[in-house]
Image (cartoon, rainbow, N blue to C red):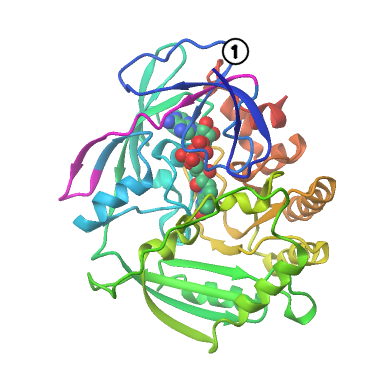
Amino acid sequence: MTVKGQSWGRYPRADQRLIALTDRHAPLPSFEGSALPHGNGRSYGDSCLNHDGTLLHTRGLDRLIAFDPATGVLRCEAGVLLADILDFAVAQGWFLPVTPGTKFVTVGGAIANDVHGKNHHVAGCFSEWVNGFELLRSDGSRRWCSPSENADWFAATAGGLGLTGVITWAELRLRRVRGAWMNVETHRFSRLREFLQLSAASESDYEYTVAWIDCAARGDRLGRGHFIRANHAPAGDGPARPRRRLAVPVTPPVSLINSLSLRAFNTLYYHRQRGRVAHALTHYEPYFYPLDSIGDWNRIYGRRGFLQYQCVVPPEDAEHTLTDLIEQIADSGTGSFLAVLKMFGQRRSAGILSFPRPGATLALDFPNDGHATFELLERLDDVVAAAGGAVYPAKDARMRADRFRAYFPAWETLRPYLDPRFSSGFWRRVTE
Ligand SMILES: Cc1cc2nc3c(=O)[nH]c(=O)nc-3n(C[C@H](O)[C@H](O)[C@H](O)COP(=O)(O)OP(=O)(O)OC[C@H]3O[C@@H](n4cnc5c(N)ncnc54)[C@H](O)[C@@H]3O)c2cc1C
């Protein structure tokens, strides 16, 4: 069956054949042309799309295989969602050691993008907590890949964008927590220098650090925002939690995000906190996954969808480079409600193509306004490339091939590990 598919950014669209995988012991089904494993489609651009090819849907590989409540070691199939892991683990005092900003991603997708969270400076990437996984190739071969066994395959597949084969199941190490609650401290800051100072001062005592930036502010307000640092609460209990699940019921024909709504929202959001510092005891769900409570929020950008831009720039000149980026974004009058800024730590990932590296990472969503949006993102690329930074493939739908090769100079070392029958829209765009 050929269906139109799209990723989380709803841009671009691809015609693809879908095949569901449901049995981890079974050989790969036969397919024509190229194939690509697919998790839960929470990547934004075309790294999880395969126009004119096949998608191997892995959500049917959804079994938990074994869990040791004494050590926190979990074996599960690759299509299990992080949400499913949290549902059974938190009650037993265990938590994901690294989580992205949505819990609706699969274990296979988290490994293939080697995702990071707000604790990169202390916990590194997702793969750091993976004891190993089984990799099934289109020639029928199966390999156990771990940091000590087939370590080269482990490095190629962690962050390998699904191009080395299908991960069928994995063994992860969870981390201890006392309960579901977080101690959260929010500092309002008025310039980027303050953000950098707060980040540096929080590194050793706070496990989670991240900031929201007002990307519409200009002049002497440029670089203002909220810095949020947190630790798991030592107490097992917290206040009753209101449960609300909102949804965007239809896709509006045009984006609801425009320069007026953006500026008004950002100004209100910046001033929502009266004092400079606020404390709260917060449940982990709204803390880690604020957008997960709004079903299909990606629809608010309208039928043309949106593009996310996440980059990392080296720490030495971060203030100057970030100022340059935010000025370009503010001048364009476009940008997202949620502009997220964080300092990555020094921890090196095992993955050849893993995105995090030391420095400041900035992530924003842009409504797809066609030419103007693509031109703006090219200009941002100019700044990032000149600074020696990189753009995140999991969020990308348009970076040029020469940029990708400059951002990921080790990309060619992946070649011997690529499955000859696997490909993606992203990979063809940046390597052919
Ligand atoms: C609201 C939101 C917040 C996010 N926050 C973050 C964040 O903080 N940090 C971060 O790093 N990312 C973040 N992301 C991106 C997201 O975490 C990653 O794109 C993640 O990899 C998506 O997983 P998925 O299961 O949906 O996989 P998909 O998007 O379907 O696929 C991702 C990649 O994994 C491959 N793949 C999937 N399953 C397998 C398998 N079984 N075997 C081999 N390859 C496979 C695919 O081929 C593809 O290349 C966020 C996304 C959203 C929507």
Q: In which quarter of the image is the C terminus?
A: top right
User: Is 63 drawn above or below residue 282 in the view shown?
Assistant: above
Query: At x 46% / y 70%, what residue is drawn?
Result: 203
Local secondary structure at mark 1: loop
Magenta run includes residue 65: yes
Distance from mark 1 CB to nearest ligand 1 atom below 8 Å: no
Start-end of magenta stretch: 52-73
Mark 1, other Cα within 10 Å: few <14 / some 14–19 / many ≥20: few
User: Is 328 drawn above or below residue 186 in the view shown?
Assistant: above
Q: Position of residue 385 (x, y in %)?
A: 75, 50
Nearer the observer, 53 or 119: 53
Please indicate, yes or no, whether residue 321 appears anywhere in the rendered image.
yes
Kindly identify the amino acid type of the residue bearing the numbered disc 1. Answer: Gly
Query: From the viewer's perspective, is 203 left or right of 317?
Result: left
User: Is 228 drawn above or below residue 353 in the view shown?
Assistant: below
> Would you name the residue on which mark 1 appears?
33
Query: From the viewer's perspective, is 145 left or right of 156?
Result: left
